[in-house]
Structures are given as structure tokens and as C-alpha cells.
Image (cartoon, grey):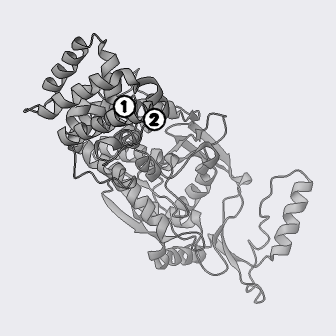
Amino acid sequence: MTVRTRFAPSPTGYLHVGGVRTALFSWLYARKHGGQFILRIEDTDRKRSTDASVNAILEGMNWLGLQADEGPFYQTQRFDRYREVIEQLLAKDQAYYCSCSKERLENLRNEQMARKEKPRYDGHCRHMTSSPDSSVKPVIRFKNPKVGQVLIRDLIKGIVVFNNSELDDLIIARSDGTPTYNLTVVVDDWDMQITQVIRGDDHLNNTPRQINILEALGATVPEYAHVPMILGNDGQRLSKRHGAVSVMNYKEEGYLAEALLNYLVRLGWSHGDQEIFSIQEMIDLFDINAINSSPAAFNNDKLLWLNQHYIKTGNPEQLALQLRFQFEQLGIETTKGPTLVEIIQAQAERAKTLKEMAKNSRYFFMETIEYDEKAIKKHLKPAIREPLNDLCERLARLPDWNAEAIHEIIHAIAEQYTLKLGKIAQPLRVAVTGGTISPPIDVTVKLIGQTRSVERIKHAVTFIGDRNE
């Protein structure tokens, strides 16, 4: 049998890291076993589902490289199929119309809670043979078995048992005729021949209900794997208050897709002590049975560490395309100045995100720079004006503009004025960048370019003079 997994998000909000991890595990399982990965959009909640959310899901999956073999399929395009299955259940006396009013159901719930019982439907309409009350638009309920157990051999949690007596007759079609989640999921998994359902453990309570419907339909029951939730640093479920945002926010903040996937695959799963995984290694080594059954805690420092690793070891030409996006976000034009590949090569060791790299590299492309006040006070002092001016003149005459030649001139000036190298290098750095942090000064000056560097040093020399006066 061909392995077929699926990722089935609801487009009622952004695609978050919890959903991405579930999608990743499903994708890896299919890839490892030579199967297919299906993308399904569960958009039957018409009030909350939006096109913007659908686009966010598709954009996020595309950015991460989690391509589906089939889909995306949309549940709103399958209503005829759901109605067909509902009619089939009604015809086989495995479903029934329920005309219970909201008032009756609310009273029932209050009475059960007063008795400290688990609130559930009491089957009032289950055996009625008369026509539904015309004054109430009926819902349709599934006739859940009253006796026996549902045994789930969960690939992560092990054996989980539910008593049918604890499960009520769930609604499979609302009063307006639209199908409910538990019905649509069952039909889709059946029709799409899903062999393994990998999803968050918040769905575990739905699983016995869905298995009972599948068995009533004579369908093959897939294997289930319920992935534990992700927690914040306070031990609570990861949410917006922890900074949990759309996966595309990670792109905007300068994270690499490879780093995020590497981090998420290790969030609850491990292969020995290995921390760094290529995509192919993830596929080859992934074992769903090795996923921890306990919740995992999100650690942004670890994600940053991984992101920096991928920046340092990544292909500069590929990283340059993503760095361009960061400069565009800052409104900085990069056509006049060093190449972005050169920026990557110079700054890779100094940035944890591409956004940080772009912010720290603005001076390579700006026509004018602003001085940091602390840097001015510490390094642009009157005593350095003459050496800086001499350095400027030599750089202006340099026929071959390269880092090695620039390095030699800086050393020569330091020796001429009996200065430690840092005593000339730091003032030069402030002069050309505005601050005290940059790649090696010879590389920095080389990348800024001869014309811009000379102009900036001249400006610094004049600034020192004016400030001194």
C-alpha cells in the first residue's frame, strides 16, 4: 500500500509554527516511505475562513519548500460528496434527524453539569420515527455505538482507549445543511486514501468519533499519530503572547527556511545528539516512533543559533536573493555599491538573521551616514585629524583598490605616527561607517568603494576640525 499523508489546515488565521511542524512531520513521513503528501484546505467554516488565510498557508508552505504531491483540495468544493455520504448514513439508519431546540440542549447541559456529569447529548431523537418538528430546522446526528470501545494504536502515544458510552451522537450536518468538521474529515481521508493521519494532539478526542464513522461507512481506518503541542517558556501553550506569529513573519525577520525546518524537526524528535540536519538527512533519518509523547518547549535562542549557522554555511548567491528582500524592506537601493554576495561573505559571521545583516550593512549603500555620538567622542579626537587626513590622501591615490593594498596603507600610517593599529583603524571605521562595528576595516573600506570612502574620510577630517574650533 502506498503511504499517503496529509496536512489539512483551516484558513481561519495565519500558518503558525505548530501547524508547520505537523506539516513537516507529515511531509517527511511521506518522503521517507516513498509516498504522497496531500494538502487540503478545510474551509467549511465560512464565517471565519478567508482568502487571505488561504494565501498565507500556500505562501508559507511554498517558502518552506514543503511541496504537496496533490492539492490543494478545498472542502467547500466537495459539498455534494458530503451530502451523498450523509444520505448514505441516513439510509442505513446510522444517522438521524434531531429537532431538539437550543433551550432543551442548554437545559440538558446545565442539569448534567449540576450532577457533575460530562455534558453530552442524551439521544432524545435517536429512535424517533415521526417526521421532524417542522418548527425547528433539524440537524443530523451520527448514531454512535452505545457499547464497546475504540482502541487507537497511536504511533506516538501508544494505545489509547475510549469507551463508546462516553461518546455522544455528534452532529454531522448543521441545521442549514452544511457538514461539520468530523464528517468532512472522515470523508476526505477516506476518498483521498490517507494511510497515516499525523496531526496535533488537540484532535485526539475527535479520533474515536471519526473512527466510528469510518467503520460505519465500511472504510479503511488510517493509522493515527497525535503530535504533542508546543509550549512557550512559561509552560503554557504557545500563543501570540509568546510572540508566536505567522510563519511568514520569520521570513520577514530574516530567518532562513532551512533553519526553521531544522529547528522544528528537533522540537520533540531527535536522532542521537545530532543538531544540524539537511533536508535529505531529515528524510533519511526521520522516525515517527521517535517523537516524544510529551510537549516540547519553544526556544528562540536555539532557533537564532541555528539560523546563524545556516547563514555562515549557506550558499552566498542564494542568501543574496533573500538579503535583497531585507534591504527592500528597509527602503535601501542596492544597485550602487558592493554586490550582495560580497556583503554576505563579509558579514556572515556577524549576524544571526538576514534582517540584522541588512541593518548593519546600510552604510555600504547610503550616500551619507550619521555618526554615533559615543563613537565620535571616543575616536574622532583632534589628535587623529592629521593621521586620518594623510590616510585619506594615500587612499585617494591608490591605483589598485583592493583590501590588501588598503591594509598596507593603514599599517604604514600607524607606523608613521607611532600608533597602535586600533588607534587609526577605529577612527577610520567611524569615518566611513558612522559606528565602531564592521567587518575587518580593510574589507569594509574596499566594499564601500574608493570614491565614497575618500569622501567620508574627508568629511570626518573636516568634522573634527569644526568640532575642535
Residue 183: give x, y in percent of width and height. Answer: 56, 66
Query: Quick one: 358 or 459, which is closer to the camera?
Result: 459
Going 21% across and 16% down the picture, which residue do you hit?
Answer: 411
Going 38% across and 32% down the picture, which residue do you hit?
Answer: 465
Residue at the disc numbered 1: 430
Query: Quick one: 378 or 208, which is closer to the camera?
Result: 378
The picture quadrant where one finds residue 124 is bottom right
The picture quadrant where one finds residue 98 is bottom right
In this view, 142 is above or below 272: below
Residue at the disc numbered 2: 372
| Quadrant of image for the C terminus | top left
Query: Quick one: 273 or 83, which is closer to the camera?
Result: 273
In this view, 84 is above or below 340: below
Observer able to see residue 351: no
Would residue 202 be found to the left or right of residue 324 on screen?
A: right
Q: Looking at this rendering, what residue extends furthest in the left direction?
A: 399
Q: Which of marks 1 and 2 is nearer the N terminus?
A: 2
Q: Do the residues labelled 1 and 2 touch (CB within 8 Å)?
A: yes
Would residue 272 be found to the left or right of residue 100 on screen?
A: left
Going 45% across and 38% down the picture, which residue do you hit?
Answer: 264
Would residue 42 be found to the left or right of residue 427 on screen?
A: right
Label 1: element kind: helix
Q: Looking at this rendering, what residue extends furthest in the bottom direction?
A: 134
Which amino acid is tagged 2?
Asp
| Alpha carbon distance from label 1 to label 2 | 8 Å
Observer able to see residue 138: yes
Which amino acid is tagged 1?
Val
In this view, 18 is above or below 462: below
Q: Looking at this rendering, what residue extends furthest in the front direction?
A: 469
Query: Quick one: 176 or 331, which is closer to the camera?
Result: 331
Residue 198: give x, y in percent of width and height. Answer: 47, 47
